[in-house]
Image (cartoon, rainbow, N blue to C red):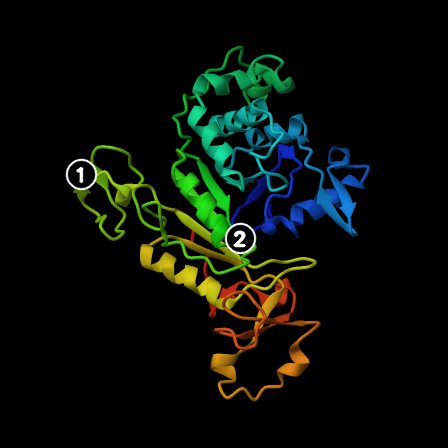
Amino acid sequence: MSKIEWTERSWNPIIGCAIVSPGCTNCYAMRMAHRLGQNPMTPAYADLTRVVNDKPVWTGEVRLAGHDAITAPMKRRTPTIWFVNSMSDLFAGGMEDSWIDAVFAVMALTPQHTYQVLTKRPERMQDYVRGITLERLSKAFAPGALRMSRNDVYRAFGLAEKFSYDPPTPRLPLPNVWLGVSAEDQRRANERIPILLDTPAQTRFVSIEPMLGQISLVSDLGGIQWMGGQRGCGGMHVGTGAPGCPRTPHHHHDARCRPGLDWVIVGGESGPGARPMHPDWARLLRNECSAAGVPFFFKQWGEWAAHIDRDVDDDDWRADYGRMETGRYCWLNLAGRTGFHGDRFHVMRRVGKKAAGRLLDGVLHDGMPG
């Protein structure tokens, strides 16, 4: 079972990664890979990280985790939600297309499962998904490919006694594969989400974790209303209720009917060096999701919890802020800076992930795509 609240199991057929943006700075996978690399029982992780300023950092090398890791979902009949590559990024530099083919082939051959693919490299994901074909995926199981013969496929499905096997023909895009991007701030949201929305997929989502700044998902960037839109393409569309895109058949072909996000995950940072998340950042996305009818999942506050909301708890500014400037406390305003006079000034206190919990204004938000 996975400790990640929004999935059931993690599947890591490929391991290793590289830092690409501020959200990677305190990556839990980087720390875990370093620990595993020191363990003689997990030699596959050796040398995937190096120590820089007393902290483990990805080297940029990626590698296959092994035959058993690649075929793991094929050995499980019970329908399961899998987070793909929690210890890497499926579309990171260095990933061979044949490796990605093998991952997508396993997903195609296990329609009972649901797969969540999350990346910070949406350009490569888009190029790959647009070019994928069933013929290409079938070659991932050619004799000798990744040391996987047809007999391996038979055994994975409990069909070892058969001499031939004709898997059900999948359709593209794979309906059991959700594609998503990470976005830690508005800049990365602006860069990555429009590419995701133009990528063929049954379900699209964004994971805003760690949340390092205020993000709005209703920005009209390039004509795309991220929180609205329609899953169809061409011809007659049935909208999702976004402004200008009602839940009735219609025939316009502009940005109002482009796909929108199907799911939004939000979470603060945890672990060593964790940075605080302003409560209003999470509230804004909760409210936007509610207005657009998009499932909202609040994963965690992370290491920090609100200690004083000056506007609510200390409107006459009588609190002793001088003793709350260092150590377990952090000043934070809406702009993400520490200025005392900034808008919506909060004092955040480091209490630990467990104590900070998962409640947003006293409510547990566990929204998932239908």
Q: Is 100 situated above or below 347?
A: above
- Residue 318's label in the rendered image is none
Q: Quadrant of the N terminus?
A: top right
Question: In terms of sequence position, does the residue under pointer 1 or pointer 2 come before the other?
Answer: 2
Tell me the residue at 17%/41% (across/down): 250
Q: Label 1 sits on what residue type?
A: His
Query: In the rendered view, does 224 fall on the left or right side of 14?
Result: left
Dividing the picture into quadrants, the one containing residue 196 is top left
Callout count: 2
Q: Is 263 situated above or below 13?
A: below
Q: Label 2 sits on what residue type?
A: Glu
Nearer to me, 3 or 198 = 198
- Label 1 Cα neighbours within 10 Å, binned few <14 / some 14-19 / many ≥20: few
Tell me the residue at 21%/49% (across/down): 246
Q: Give the CA distance from mark 1 to mark 2.
A: 36 Å
Dividing the picture into quadrants, the one containing residue 231 is top left
Identify the residue under disc 1: 251
Dividing the picture into quadrants, the one containing residue 143 is top right
Could you tell me residue 103's position as x and y percent?
A: 55, 28
Nearer to me, 314 or 254 = 254
Identify the residue under disc 2: 184
